[in-house]
Amino acid sequence: MDKRPASFYWLAAFFALFVLFLYGPTITILILSFQGPEGGLTFPMNGVSLHWFRQLFAGIGVVDIGKAFWNSFGLGLIVTVVTVVASIMAGLAFRRRFFGAGALFYVAIASLIVPSIVVSLGIALEFRIFDDSIKAYGDAYEVEWIWQNFTTLMGLYSSGLGAHLTWTFPFGLLIMFAVFNRFDPAYEEAARDLGATPWQTFAHVVLPIIAPSIFGVALFGFTLSWDEIARSSQAVGADTTLPITLRSLTTTVTTPAIYALGTLTTLISLLVIGSMLTALVVVRRRRAARGSDAGKGLV
Amino acid sequence: MPRSAIAASKWTPYWQAAPMALVFLVFFILPLIATLTVSFWNYTQYSIEPDFTPKNYLEVFDGCLSNLPTLCTTFRTYLSTLKFCLIVWALTLVIGFTISYFLVFHVKTLTMQIVLALICTIPFWTSNVIRMISWIPLLGRNGLVNQGLMGVGAIDTPLDGLLYSDFSVILAFVHLNTVFMIIPLLNSMFRIDKALIEAAYDGGASGWQTLWNVVIPLCKTGITIGSIFVVTIVMGDYITIGVMGGQQIASVGKIIQVQTNFLQFPLAAANSIVLLAAVLSMIVLLTRIVDIRKEL
């Protein structure tokens, strides 16, 4: 093996410092969340306990953490499924020419870089206009049902879901672009020549080849939704999500309970990251072990 | 291509692209149109009313020209945000470039490169707010940094300006967003043909000359894409500046959020449009250099 140049060691040291910078702070709060009942927000540790986790489940102040938790979890799952399905479909669409392809691509990029507060406010305004219109319609045509039941269209699974999708779709689409740019259409042609229907070709040829990337899209879908604040902030209506709750707690809670909540959310993120990456690696390994040539078109 | 495939495919891309297109239409395009429209509306304490008035924009720029050279709130806020933008951009660029350079040109095996790149990316998939508050035990008045500095006798009284200051805001921005620089730079650097580097060395170029005249020009696309991400994130931010600045530092995003909370929707909409225009013009400047689509 070649001898490493001196610059390697300098850069390696820089990399190590950067990793410490990335992970160090998070590890400190993971440790401090096990602070003893008398302990504070900083070191030293005053004993080790699960006190602050119990405190968390008992409830901090007036905030319903359990509800926020399940709101975020449910929303995250739906966002993941919708992102995966819509991204694969759009990825397939972009393999052919269609009218508006360029526009859709630039809209996706725009959605990625337009400041989230602007998108969030926009959705809030749009739904306000929807609500006002529906109420006006109810008044004009004297629709009893609207008078009795209608308050707003805004909610976690309407405007909130949409807000999250504008954030996860661009990532899903870009991943699919990268996948299909390196996809060899010969496999599909072979399947078609052997008499497979378009659906069979997709289900038995294309899907298995792109499977690892699907776990990648799912990973982005869930984690981005799970931690999303800026886009949801004005767009979830009366509901709340865990990150929004967490952010408001930063100004009011001055005990390690907030670290306990941090530890809990981070663990869920890590669990999802770990399982998606494992699934990705396992699918690839298994394919390699079987000696199949599927996926050779992928990088 | 077989005839059946052509016959079956004429409308296929349309229904395949439809779900994504529809979501973007309802939750991105229409909201932007709604924002633009409402920015010309009138408002009272209780409601917003259709109108066509420039008064929201006049209020945004109230006193901006007449009071010069004293800066109005809007100009002051943009200037402060631009300052963060520039500092954070420079730091993430230098750090991101160094990290990517190490991964691509010094790490030998592909597996190791992927593992190390993942190590840099995993924090991106965890919560930003938690990563912000995780600086409290380090930078607080009784935090590790102050304890350490007092321990070695560098200072007598704890430093107050570590947390809830410009410093902590910049630190958190760099902490959270360097990944947006690293990923596009990795993408660009992986495409550089190693033979070019060899050729430069063989031609007698020094390490720095090779870096400056070969590597950096070939990373232009990565640098531009990374810069667009970092600049737009910092320009529109109100959460990092809010949490790390102890809710004391102004930002454009924060102005919009506060006005929304006070139900001054048309005013918030006008501010959003101005912010959008500012961000877009910065992107146009940056994209003069590159075509994003070629990079995928």
Image: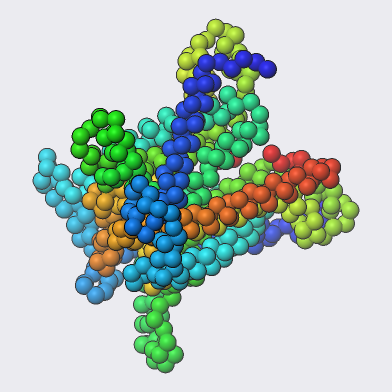
Q: Nearer the viewer, residue A101 or B155?
A: B155
Residue at 65% in and 15% down: A2
Q: Is residue B295 visible?
A: no
Q: Is residue B104 above or below residue A34?
A: above
Q: Position of residue A78 (x, y in %)?
A: 57, 65
Residue at 41% in and 70% down: A58
Name the image quarter holding the C terminus of chain B: top right
- The image shows a total of numbered marks equal to 0
Q: Nearer the viewer, residue B98 or A92?
A: B98
Q: Position of residue A69 (x, y in %)?
A: 47, 66
Q: Is residue B24 above or below residue B1?
A: below
Q: Nearer the viewer, residue A227 or A202?
A: A227
Q: Position of residue B7 (x, y in %)?
A: 77, 58
Q: Tell which residue pokes out farthest to the right in this image.
A: A194
Q: Quadrant of residue B16?
A: bottom right
Q: Is residue A202 visible?
A: yes
Q: Nearer the viewer, residue A203 or A283?
A: A283
Q: Tell which residue pokes out farthest to the top in this image.
A: B204
Q: Is residue A99 above or below residue B188?
A: below
Residue at 59% in and 17% down: A4
Q: Position of residue A263 (x, y in %)?
A: 46, 55
User: Left of A176 or right of it: where is A132?
Assistant: left
Q: Quadrant of residue A159?
A: bottom left
Q: How is the image coloured?
A: rainbow
Residue at 68% in and 60% down: B11
